[in-house]
Image (tube, grey):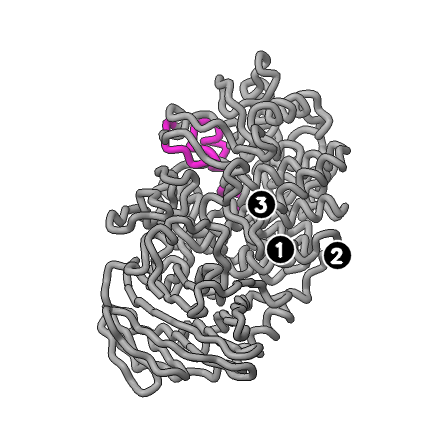
Amino acid sequence: MDEQPTERRNRRIEDYGLIGNNHTAALVHRCGDIDWLCLPKFDSPAIFAALLGDEDNGCWSLRASDPKAKVTRRYRAGTAILETTFTTRGGAATVIDFMPTPGVGGAIELVRLVRGDRGAIDFETAIRFRFDYGQQLPWVRANPVGLTAVAGPDAVRLVSTVPLTNKDFATRSTFRVRAGETVDFSLIWYASHLPPPDCRAPEPLLAQTQSEWAGWIASSNYDGPHRELVERSLITLKLLTYQPTGGIVAAPTTSLPEQIGGPRNWDYRYCWVRDATLSLYAFLSSGFHAEAEAWRRWVMRAAAGSPQDLQIMYGLHGERRLWEYEIPRLAGFAQSRPVRIGNQAHEQRQLDIYGELIGGIFASHRMGANGAQEAWPLLCVAVDFLESIWREPDNGIWEVRGPRRHFTHSKLMAWVAFDRAIALAEQLSLKAPLDRWRNTRKAVHAEICERGWNPKRKAFVQYYGGDTLDAALLIMPLTGFLPVDDPRLQSTIRAIERELMPDGLVQRYTPAPHVDGLPPGEGAFLACSFWLCDVYKLSGRARKAAALFKKLLGAANDLGLFAEEYDPRAKRQLGNFPQAFSHVGLINSAHILAGRTVGAMRRAERERDEPLG
C-alpha cells in the first residue's frame, strides 16, 4: 500500500478533487488519497499535509488492493460529493467522499463510504495522523469502533465498520466489499479538552448533504452554454466560503508552486478583498444574493477602523496579522520550496483595494442587494483618505516583493473608487463632496492617460515610466475607464497578444527580478485569459472570444477545477488549487459570452456626467 517516492513526485495539481463543508476543505487524489486537510478551519494547521511532503507528513490512503484497478471519478451532479470508482476483473466499488454541515457543538466530519457496485473487490486503507503540518505525531488510542488521536488542542475520532490495526505509526485495514454492501469511515475533529462527540449515521448524512447542495445550486439563474461547468465553478466558490463569517478564501491550499521547483509559493487560505469582490460579481450575476450579503457584512467588519488601516487581505474572521513563516521540514509539492504559512502581503499597500471595496458595494446596490446606505459612512472616509494617497506608489495587484512603483492598474482602480462613490451618492441622494470627488476623478483619469501610456510601445504599460505590459489593464474597458473601441485600448490588446501570449493563454506580466523581486518563470494566469475573453466579446470579436474560452476550458481538470495558473507547454496546472480567481473568471466570462454580461454591466452602469479620455 505504501507508494514509492517517485510515484508521489510525479503527482500533478490537477490530479486532485475538492470536498468541503464551508468551514474547511480536503484535497482527494484520483487514486483515493486525502493528501490535504486542515482542521477545523481553512487556515488551521493541516492534519494531512502529504500534498507538501510525503505520507509521513499525514495522509489517508483508501484504494483498491489491485494496483491495476481502473480508476474513474466524478462529482454527483450539482453537489460537492466526490465519487471515485475502482474497477477490477472481479468487481467494482465506489468511494464516496463528502463533508457534511457541522453538527451540534461544531464538530467537523469527513465521511468516506466504500459502496460495492458489482462482484467483489478488495480494498486497503492506511491512515497516518500527523498534526501541525506533519510535525506532530499524535497520541493514538484504539477503541471497539475505531480510535482517537490527540495532539495539543486538537483531537480526531475515527469510526469504522471494519477492524483497524495500528502498526508503524499508521492505522491500517484490509477488507472486501461486495455488491450491495457499504463500508463506512467517519473522521470527526473536536477540541481535545472535550469528550469525543457522537458519530452521526453516514447514510442519512449523505442524503442530507446531497439535498442541501441540490437545493443551493437550484438558485442559479445561468442558462447559457457550458452550464455544467459554470455550476461547478459556483459550487467551488461556495466551497471556498467560510460560512460562520461570510469570508471567501482565495484557495484552500498553501505553497502549491507557480513554477515547479521554484520559490513562488504562497499561502492563499485567507480572504483577499479583491478576490472576494470578484466572487461577489459572480454570485450576484448568477442569482445568489445571500452569499453577496454575507460578503458585504464580512467586509464591513473587516474594514472597520481607520481607512489608512485598510488591508488587502484578512483572516477568516477579519484577523489582521497573518505573519509569514516557513516550514523547512516540508519538502514542498514536487520539491518546490519554501513551504510558507501566513502571508507577508497583508502588510503591503495596494491602492486598488479601495476601488474593489467601493466597486463591490456599488455592484451590490445595482444588482438589488441592500446595505449601500449602511456602508456609506465607511465609504466616504475611505474615499477621502484615497484622495490624499492616490498619487503615491504601491505594491500593485500582483503583490510584488520588489520596490513600490506607480502601477497603472492601481491608479485605474483608484479612479474606479471615485467613480463608483460618485455614482452611489448620485443614485441614492447621499451627502458627499461631489464637486471635489469629480475633480479628483478627472485628475486620476488624465494622469493615467498621460503617464500610464507609453507612446513608443503604443500601449498602456505596467507602471509609469516603464515599458513592460500588464494583463491587469485588460479590465480598463470592463470598468468603463475607456470605451472598448478606444484606439489606445485596442493597441494595448494587440501588444498583449504579441508579447504575453506565447502559448495561446495570457501571462499576467513578464516576471523580472527588478520588478517583483523573484526569479522569473511562471505559467499563464487564467483569470487574465478570461478577462481577454470578455474584452474580445465586448469588442465584437465573438468568435475569437468563444475560441479562447474553449481553450481555457481545456485547462480545467476532469472534475472542472482550475488552479491559479496553467503551463500550456507542459499541459499542467500551477499555483494554489482550486483558485477562486480562476473560477470567478469562468463564471463571469460565461455570462458575457451568453449575453448576460457582468462586464458590460460595469461598462454601462450609468450614464457619465462628463466625457472620458
Q: Residue 492 appears in which quarter of the rendering?
A: top right
Residue 217 belongs to magenta span:
no
From the viewer's perspective, tell me whether residue 415 is left or right of residue 393: right
Mark 2 vs mark 3, CA separation in Å: 22 Å
Mark 2 vs mark 1, CA separation in Å: 14 Å
Q: Give the amino acid type for the residue marked by disc 1 in the picture.
A: Phe
Residue beneath label 1, please?
Answer: 283
From the viewer's perspective, tell me whether residue 430 is left or right of residue 332: right
Assess whether mark 1 and mark 3 are in contact (beta carbons under 8 angstroms): no
Magenta stretch in the rendered image: 379-403
Residue plotted at (76% across, 37% down): 542
Kindly give the residue lying farthest to the front in the view shown.
89
In the rendered image, the vertical position of residue 107 relative to residue 370, given as above or below: below
Q: Is residue 505 visible?
A: yes
Measured as percent of width and height from the top left, residue 538 is found at 73, 36
Measured as percent of width and height from the top left, residue 557 is found at 56, 51
Residue plotted at (55% across, 21% down): 452
Quadrant placement of the N terminus: bottom left
Q: Earlier in the sequence, mark 2 or mark 3?
A: 2
Residue 383 belongs to magenta span:
yes
